Image: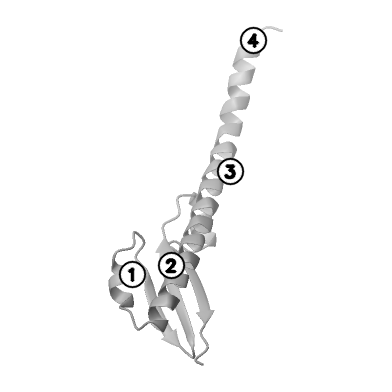
């Protein structure tokens, strides 16, 4: 029982990078989920604008995310890109990460 404080410090220094990596991964996945939820809500508004012949470009230009949209095969597709902060996750998920939502529209 000579130097327990030094041992605890060494153990903390060894585990700190793992804890930081886990923390950054939680933050990144939270950002992805938040962005996907925002895109789903925006997509509902875009579909309503499309049905009422509104201006989609003006609506999307006011958004905090840089959202692009495509209309193809009766589908509206919204997508944006997120910058990740986790070092290893950047390589696995391809930084910037592309978040995409789509909805099929039916003409009646």
Where does residue 18 sit, x and y in percent of width and height? 59, 39
Callout 3–callout 1 Cβ contact below 8 Å: no
The residue that disc 2 covers is: 42
- Residue 3: mark in rendering: 4
In this orientation, which residue lies closer to the viewer: 42 or 33?
Answer: 42
- Label 4, label 2: how far apart the Cα atoms are: 58 Å
The residue that disc 3 covers is: 22
- Under circle 1, the secondary element is helix
- Under circle 3, the secondary element is helix
- Label 3, label 1: how far apart the Cα atoms are: 34 Å
Rendered position, 2 above or below 31: above
- Under circle 2, the secondary element is helix
In this view, the mark in front (4 or 3): 3
Task: Tell which circle, 4 or 3, labels the residue nearer the N-terminal end.
Answer: 4
**Residue at 49 percent of width and 89 percent of height:** 74
Q: Which quadrant is home to the N terminus?
A: top right
- Label 4, label 3: how far apart the Cα atoms are: 30 Å
Rendered position, 85 above or below 39: above
The crowding category of the residue bearing disc 1, from other C-alpha atoms within 10 Å (few below 14, some 14 to 19, many at least 20), is some
Where does residue 60 sit, x and y in percent of width and height? 33, 69
Task: Tell which circle, 4 or 1, labels the residue nearer the N-terminal end.
Answer: 4
Q: Residue furthest right?
A: 1
């Amino acid at each position: 029982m000579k130097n327990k404080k030094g041992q605890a410090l060494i153990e903390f220094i060894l585990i700190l990078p793992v804890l930081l990596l886990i923390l950054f991964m939680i933050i990144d996945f939270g950002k992805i989920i938040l962005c996907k939820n925002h895109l789903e809500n925006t997509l509902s508004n875009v579909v309503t604008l499309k049905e009422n012949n509104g201006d989609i470009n003006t609506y999307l230009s006011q958004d905090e995310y840089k959202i692009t949209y495509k209309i193809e095969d009766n589908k509206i597709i919204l997508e944006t890109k997120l910058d990740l902060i986790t070092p290893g996750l950047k390589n696995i998920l391809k930084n910037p990460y592309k978040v995409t939502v789509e909805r099929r529209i039916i003409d009646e």
